[in-house]
Image (cartoon, rainbow, N blue to C red):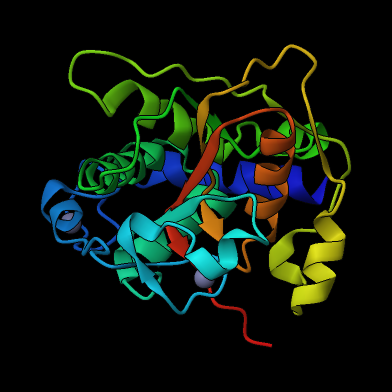
Amino acid sequence: MKNFLKKTHFIILDTLFPISCINCKKEGSWLCDKCQNNIHINEEHLCPICEKMITPDGRTCLSCKRKSFLDGLLVAASYSQFQISKAVHLFKYRFVDDLHIPLGNLFVNVLRKTELPLPNIITPVPLHKRRLRWRGFNQSALLAKHLADNLLPQNKIPFDENILIRNRYTSPQMKIKDHISRKQNIAGAFSLSPDAEIKNKTVLLVDDIATTGSTLFECAKILKEAGASEVFAIVIARQETKS
Ligand SMILES: [Zn+2]
Ligand SMILES: [Zn+2]
């Protein structure tokens, strides 16, 4: 009930006040073209596991390769940029689903600059169905679909939001401070859909924000065990935990 009221409250506010750019307040869109173009895209990328080695396109470094199923992670931008933190907050916690367009475009721009293999399939990190019902949309699925539709000028990349299933209702990772508890919270939380066809495919996994990366590592493990040849991931930003 509390959540319902919260949601209704935001909807009423949106109706009373016209949409304006979250950065410069220009009316007409959530993020105007100018402020969108001003977002600084990460040029250098780190190994997602050790977060120390700068690697081409955020590939997992050689020494981490042995202990990871994830082949690389692209972090599009820095969370410390106001447009990013504000847009993510509104998108994720205030249900402004239209923000998937500028944020999805950010993914398109970042990915086009890399030499990563073209994915055979793009899939989001799934939400548990209880949370999906509450939120009304899977924010990562909106981003993934936008990316799949717009990465190539002519063709669409296959998009499938039902490859992974979230079995358990886990506490939001953001609420858990330490690394080990996050890993335990997420272990076994996902499984593969019975009709997923990913054998020998390059899969691109999409999520909004990564913190420790535990969620992406766990999803990559399932995909690899099911025969995916390579698994890369892309997120808007990586958020530090203050523990
Ligand atoms: Zn603006
Ligand atoms: Zn590494």
The picture places residue 59, in percent across and down from the top left corner, at 42, 57
Is the N terminus in the top left, top right, bottom left or bottom right quadrant?
top right
The residue positioned 67% from the left and 28% from the top of the image is: 227
Left or right placement of residue 196 versus residue 70 in this view: right
Tell me, yes or no, if residue 114 can be seen here: yes
Residue 99 versus residue 54 in the image, above or below: above
Left or right placement of residue 4 versus residue 238 in this view: right
Residue 85 versus residue 50 in the image, above or below: above
- Residue 223 sits in quarter: top right
Is the C terminus in the top left, top right, bottom left or bottom right quadrant?
bottom right
The residue positioned 78% from the left and 37% from the top of the image is: 128
Residue farthest along the bottom direction in this orientation: 243
Residue farthest along the left direction in this orientation: 34
The residue positioned 58% from the left and 54% from the top of the image is: 93
Q: Nearer the viewer, residue 121 or 81?
A: 121
The picture places residue 100, in percent across and down from the top left corner, at 40, 39
The picture places residue 134, in percent across and down from the top left corner, at 74, 38
Left or right placement of residue 157 versus residue 243 in this view: left
Q: Nearer the viewer, residue 35 or 120?
A: 120
The residue positioned 45% from the left and 22% from the top of the image is: 120
- Residue 210 sits in quarter: bottom right
